[in-house]
Image: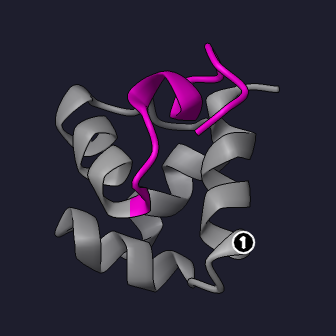
Amino acid sequence: MNYTKRLYDLRTDNDLTQEDVARVLNTTKQNYGRYENGKRKLNIDDLITLSKFYKVSTDYILCLKNEP
């Protein structure tokens, strides 16, 4: 698994839309969608924000650990 799938899974497991998560990151739905489809690399600031938002470790998002 790579982090794009993990981002998708976290979002859908929390019943959120791409637009919801984009608001958390203060970006557009299109820009966030590029993270999920692998067309844009996740930057460190957004990684940290998502980690705090979902209450999981950055290692979990990056698929370095399987436990949140």
Q: Which residue is mark 1?
A: 13
Neighbor class of circle 1 (other Cα within 10 Å; few <14, some 14-19, many 20+) is few
Residue 37 coordinates in the image, percent (x, y): 67, 47
Quarter of the picture holding the C terminus: top right
| Residue 54 as seen in the image, left or right of residue 23 | right
Q: How is the image coloured?
A: one colour
Q: Where are the magenta residues, as a range?
A: 54-68
Is 22 displayed left or right of 36 in the figure? left
Q: Secondary structure at mark 1?
A: helix
Q: Is residue 48 above or below residue 7?
A: above
Determine which quarter of the picture holds residue 2: top right
Q: Amino acid at mark 1?
A: Asp
Question: In the rendering, at what x and y percent does residue 3 appear?
Answer: 63, 32
Residue 36 placement (x, y as % from top left)? 61, 50
Q: Residue furthest front?
A: 67
- Where residue 45 sits, quadrant-wise, is top left
Q: Is residue 48 on the magenta stretch?
A: no
Q: Residue at x 52, y 76 (%)?
A: 18
Instruction: Identify which residue is drawn at 56% across, 30% down.
Output: 60
Q: Is residue 56 above or below residue 58?
A: below
